Image (cartoon, rainbow, N blue to C red):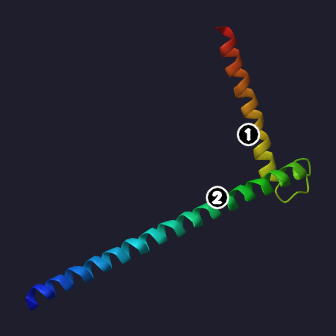
Amino acid sequence: MAFINKIGQKIGSAAGATAAKAKDLAEVTKLNSQVSDQEKQIQKLYAEIGEKIFAMDKENPESPVRDLCDQILEAQHNIAELKQKIEAIKNKE
């Protein structure tokens, strides 16, 4: 009987350890999700800052971000041209 009791204890302790690991894994997953949410929030705020700086500095030749503003303006111009081409194609039909 002692042998069976020892096996039962080992099984019980293994099950307990497995349950504890599962609980820890669930907690880590939850915390990683919260970290990801915060990182997304930071990226959103960075984008908002960038849009405001762009709006303020796009005409300023002395701006330290002038090159970046010029790249954005060029990309906006390219987008406008591409959209005109799309409309022209759609209107042909």
Is 55 displayed left or right of 21 in the figure? right
Locate the C terminus by quadrant: top right
Q: Amino acid at mark 2?
A: Lys
Q: Where residue 20 appears, x then y in whole percent? A: 37, 77
Q: Nearer the viewer, residue 9 or 82?
A: 9
Residue at image position (82%, 56%) is 65
Q: Furthest-front residue in view?
A: 1
Q: Amino acid at mark 1?
A: Ala
Q: Which mark is residue 40?
A: 2
Q: Is residue 93 above or below residue 71?
A: above
Q: Give the secondary structure at mark 2.
A: helix
At label 2, counting other C-alpha atoms closer than 10 Å, the crowd grade (few under 14, some 14-19, many 20 or more) is few
Q: Where residue 27 appears, x then y in whole percent? A: 48, 71
At label 1, counting other C-alpha atoms closer than 10 Å, the crowd grade (few under 14, some 14-19, many 20 or more) is few
Q: Distance from label 2 to label 1 (Cα)?
A: 25 Å
The quarter of the displayed image where residue 72 is located: top right
> How many numbered circles are shown?
2
Locate the N terminus by quadrant: bottom left
Q: Is residue 31 above or below residue 1?
A: above
- What residue is pinned by disc 1? 75
Is 19 displayed left or right of 39 in the figure? left
Residue at image position (48%, 66%) is 29
